[in-house]
Image: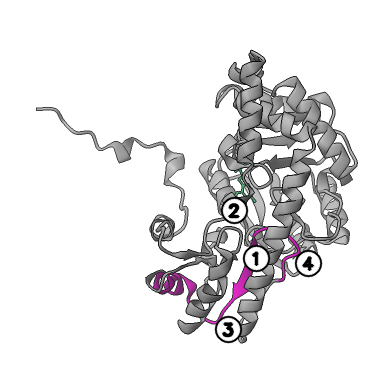
Amino acid sequence: MAVVPDTASLFAERTRGDVGEGIASVLAFLGRSDLISFAGGFPDPLTFPRQRAATLLAEFAAADEVSAFQYAPTRGLGGTLDALASRIETLQGRRPADDELLIASGAIEALELVTKSFLDPGDVVVVEGPTYLGAIQAFRGFEADVVAVPMDDEGLEVDELERRLAAGLRPKLLYAIPDHQNPAGVSLTVERRRALVELAARYGFLVVEDVAYRELGFDAAALPSLWSLAPEVVVQIGTTSKTFFPGVRLGWAAAPASVSAQLVSAKQNTDQCAGALGQRLFEEYVRRGWIEDQLARSRELYRRKCERTLAALERHLGGARWTTPRGGFFTWVTLATDTTELARRAAESGVAIVPGSLFYPDGRGNDAVRLSFSMVDESLIDAGIERLAALL
Ligand SMILES: Cc1ncc(COP(=O)(O)O)c(C=O)c1O
C-alpha cells in the first residue's frame, strides 16, 4: 500500500516563520460576500476601464501586433518602460535612467525581488508600525527579523528611529509607505522624509519606498517622493493596481543601477518577465492620457467615500479616535476593545473589518481596526458603521 508522506514535515524551514495568530481564520471569514465590507484594500470596480481596455485589445489584434502577445524582456518592454519613466518624471520630477527602472508583476513581486536580493535569515528590516500585511509576510518569508517603529499622525516617528539606530539597531532595509499609508491612512511630512533618507545614508541601509497610493491624493499635490529626494539610497516600488486595474498585475521598481541589475537577475528565476499584454495596455493607456481621466474620477470617488466614512464615525463612534486620510483607501480607528474579538462579532452582524494586530509583526495593534472605504457600496457606509458602533 502506498505510504502517504507527511508533506508538512518536508516544507522548507522558512515556511515555519510565525505569520501571526489566526490570520488565515480572520481572512477566511472576511471573504464572505454578504458582508458590508470595510476589509479588503481593493479598488472599486466602478473605476475599471472596461471599454478602453477592450478598444486597445481590438486595436492590437487588428494591427497584427506581436509584442502584446509574446514574452517580454525581463526588465520590461522598451515602450512601456519609456512611458512609465516619462510618467514618473512628470509626477516626481526625476526620470529614472534606463538601467534604473524595471517592470514587475505587481508591487508585491517587486517587493519579493528586493527581499530575495537582500535578505539573509536574521537580517533586520524596519517597518512602520502598523504596516502592510503583505510586506510583513514577504520579509518573514525570507526569515528576516521584522522590527516595527511607531507612527503618529505625521507618519513614521523618524526621531524614534534615530534613537534606535543610535542605540545599535542595524537594519538592512527600511520599508515605508509615505503616502496615504496602508493601513494607517496618514502621510509622512516633508521634514521627516528628508530626515529619513539622511539616516539611510548615515547608517547605510536601503529604504524601500512603496508608493501604492501616492497618485490617489484627494486634493493637494503629492509631497516629494523619498526616491526623488535620495535616489542613491531608495528603491521605489509602485503598482498600477489602484490606478489602472489589478487584473493586469503590473508594477515597477526604480532603484540605483546596481540594485536594479540585481532585481532583474532575481526576476529571471521567478516569472522571467511581467505579462506583455498588461504592459502594452498600460503603455497605450498612459500615452493617450486616459490614465489621467481615470485618476480624476477615482480620486473623486474615494474622497467622497472617505468623507462618508468619517462622517459616519463622527455620528456613531464619538468616543473613538481615527486618522483623517488625505488620499488612499484607509482610516485607522483606535478603540478601547479587543478588536480581534470585535471583528468576529462584526462579521456575525454582517460587517467586515480587519483587526489591527494583523498589521504589526509583534502582536500589537489589538486596540485598533483598519477600515477600508475603497470598495464598500457608498449607500451602505452609514449602516455599516452604525452596526459596528452597536457592538461597542
Ligand atoms: C502598500 C501596498 N503595497 C503593495 C500592494 C500590492 O500591490 P500589487 O497589486 O501591485 O501587488 C498593496 C495592495 O494592497 C498595498 O496596499
Q: Residues within 10 Å of mark 4 (few under 14, many from 20)?
A: some
Mark whose residue sits in front, 4 or 3:
3
Q: Is residue 340 above or below residue 120?
A: below
Sequence-first tag of 4 and 1: 4
Per the model, the C-alpha gap separating discs 3 and 2 is 25 Å
Q: Which mark is residue 305?
A: 1
Sequence-first tag of 1 and 2: 2
Q: The disc labelled 4 sits on which kind of residue?
A: Glu
Label 2 beta carbon within 8 A of ligand 1 = no
Q: In the figure, is residue 12 to the left or right of 198?
A: left
Name the residue beneath numbered marker 2: 44
Residues tagged 1 and 2 counted as in contact (Cβ below 8 A): yes
Count of numbered tags? 4
Q: Residue 55 falls in which quadrant of the image?
A: top right
Q: Quadrant of the N terminus?
A: top left
Image position, residue 388 (x, y; %) = 49, 77
Residue at 14% over, 27% down: 2
Per the model, the C-alpha gap separating discs 4 and 3 is 26 Å
Per the model, the C-alpha gap separating discs 4 and 1 is 22 Å
Q: Which residues are magenta?
A: 324-346
Residue at 82% over, 43% down: 227
Answer yes or no: is residue 53 visible: yes
Sequence-first tag of 4 and 3: 4
Observer-nearest of 383 and 146:
383
- Given the current orientation, which residue lies at the most extreme left position? 1
Mark whose residue sits in front, 4 or 2:
2
Kind of element beneath mark 4: loop
Q: Is residue 314 above or below residue 128?
A: below
- Given the current orientation, which residue lies at the most extreme bottom position? 319
Name the residue beneath numbered marker 3: 316
Mark whose residue sits in front, 4 or 1:
1
Q: The disc labelled 3 sits on which kind of residue?
A: His
